[in-house]
Amino acid sequence: MIHLIQTLGHTTLSRLSTLGRACFLLLRLLSAIGSVLYRFRLLVTQLYSVGVLTFLIVVVSGFFIGMVLGLQGYTTLSDFGAESALGQMVGTSLVRELGPVMAALLFAGRAGSALTAEIGLMKATEQLSGMEMMAVDPIKRIIAPRFWAGFFSMPILSLLLSTAGVLGGYLVGVEMLGVDNGIFWSRMQSTIDFKSDVLNGVIKSIVFGFVVTWIAVFEGYDAIPTSEGVGRATTRTVVYSAFAILGLDFILTALMFGDF
Amino acid sequence: MTLTASQPAEMMVSVNKLSFSRASRVIFDDITINIRRGKITAIMGPSGTGKTTLLKLIGGQLRPQTGTINVDGIIVNQLSRQRLFELRQRMGMLFQSGALLTDLSVFENVAFPMREHTQLPESMIHSLVLMKLDAVGLRGAHQLMPSQLSGGMARRVALARAIALDPQIMMYDEPFAGQDPLSMGVLLKLIHVLNNALNLTSIVVTHDIHEAFTIADEVYLISEGKVVEHGSAKQIQTSSSEWVQQFIHGHYDGPVPFHYPAADYRSELFGLAGTKSSAP
Amino acid sequence: MQKHNLTELLVGLFVSAGLIALFFLAMNVSNLRETANPDGYRLVARFNNIGGLKTRSPITISGVKVGRVGSITLDQDSYNALVTLNINPGICVPEESIASILTSGLLGEQYIGLEPGGLDECLADHDEIELTQSAVILEKLISKFLFDKADSQAQ
């Protein structure tokens, strides 16, 4: 029994100190924004590997999600004779929820885990240590550009997913299932408000981008520098990111859309 | 603001009464090491005594619990990050694995510190990089990527990179580990030549006895956090300490026993409720 | 150098794609086209019961959308609902128009329908629409129906 309490206490304390280390890293990353913008090239290279390479999976997934939404939505709505609301349904679901959340999850799985593995491996092969000894701050040179690249890419990816989704929903709803083209778009347009729906979705994705990239970058930087340690860190990135995304999504949704 | 201490100018690096522990394990216990300017000093000892940790302490990557580390008149463990970075530009470190940046070519790797710390024009950097690579004999390999290099070649490139900004101190972390005799010979020559040609102070951490004795002007033997013996190579070889003799000749048994402490052999084999005997 | 240019190009394309997506969502998916109307004017109307009317519900004349509901507040003195109507510029709402809360379709999305009055004068900014008809509450309708039925049976 005592042993159980001891383990619990130890785990809690170690989790708390991990959180503390993560916050210290975050402070240094935030203060590095100046040098990152100054060395713009580094940011661009990272935007490529983090953003552009996730582009394809996000767009394809978005497209399929939109198509499934169109299909399922049509089936359900036709029970109420409300097929004409399909555009509205597809649009609202994507812009408010699925765009930011799915893009963030896909990002965590593809780009987040890659970031963790890359940084962890650099730590394990002493490249970060070597840089420190060459009087180059690895946080400013290696880690901060990756962090900010993730932060900037996330909203773009979320918008791309929503767009691809709407087009997928259009394809299924209008072209395949026969919902009227004009009604599809007009119902959507009259219900979705730019400020409270689209922009809120963007705000969500910015928050997700911040948190997911922070987790990915920290896990890599904090990883135990062995092959096993890096592997476990990569897994942790994906798992913790998923928890964070879904938890934050609930909180943000309640804050933004709860007061109806 | 650099803090100076009274230190004979003869000593480039002075480790004074240093104690360092990590996770309740004492690594260094009140040790004092003096590295003479312009000379090659070898730091040796069994694996795991923290020789690499010592280099990290000198370089300021770790902070000691007590004691001071004095590099050319500057107390390292009290420096701010900014000052520490400035000091590090005067130090070069060769890591055991080379620690080259894997996404850059050999040329880019050697150019890295120049590009980060100087405003030199590209043409000058180009010449300087080729000169450094030529010093280690790898000028022809400047287009290769680190993954295409053998271990020994990677180490030489790392050495070229470490001397890129003409440091005053060079630290070598196990440079001979796992090298074939040819690479070993090349590295030995390079360490020796560079030390003299560039007026360096070199600190070599290793447990390769023979190699160390070949080039070192002074040797420190460290075990269990304390300095066991120090002096010239000759003085060490003629030391009366049994431990030192076992270490440098590689006797498998002596003051450091062969057998890990265990219960009585007979009773463990036959499961008898044991009497412990003192014989191994 | 060739590699660098390609990378930069692709990143530029990526960011542009994001901006285009934003534009698409703004224009074709949301209602951004309509809300950019600061030149419109405001009218007020009082209702006994607004039913399910919400802010930003549409306001129509003869079925054509002419504006959106601005704010809905409770008048503490008369216990009426005070509704602000944002009317698009260039629309004339004649005096003595009637504002009714109607339901569109079966799913009950409520809106304000304006029936134009007979006079030539247009209502100006901050004027009040005097004649209003509140929303139809289902329970009251049912009880009225039952009451009428009972009434006619008794006769």
Image (spheres, rainbow, N blue to C red):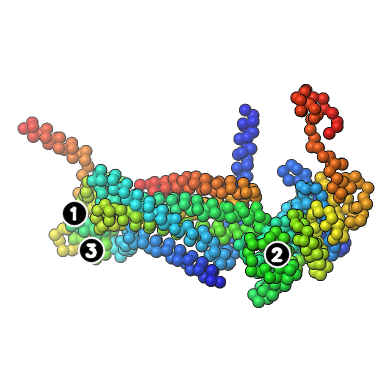
Residue B89's x, y, as percent?
72, 65
Residue B157 — which label? 2
Q: Judging from the image, what secondary structure is the residue with disc 3 in?
A: loop
Q: Please report whichever mark, 1 or 3, sits nearer to the chain's N-terminal start.
A: 3
Structural crowding at the residue carrying mark 2, measured as other residues with C-alpha within 10 Å and reported as few (<14), some (14–19) or many (≥20):
many
On screen, residue B221 above or below B111: above
Q: Judging from the image, what secondary structure is the residue with disc 1 in?
A: strand
Residue C112's x, y, as percent?
23, 53
* Residue B61 falls left or right of residue A167: right
Residue type at mark 1: give it: Ile
On screen, residue A179 above or below C2: above
Badge 3 sits on which subunit? Answer: C
Same chain assignment for discs 1 and 3: yes
| Most foreground residue, B113 or A125 | A125
* Residue A203 falls left or right of residue C103: right
CA–CA distance in space, label 1 to label 3: 15 Å
| Foreground disc of the pair 2, 3 | 2
| Foreground disc of the pair 1, 3 | 3
Query: Exactly how many numbered labels are in the figure?
Result: 3
Badge 1 sits on which subunit? Answer: C
Q: Name which quarter of the figure residue C68 lies in.
A: bottom left
Structural crowding at the residue carrying mark 1, measured as other residues with C-alpha within 10 Å and reported as few (<14), some (14–19) or many (≥20):
some
Residue B198's x, y, as percent?
80, 69
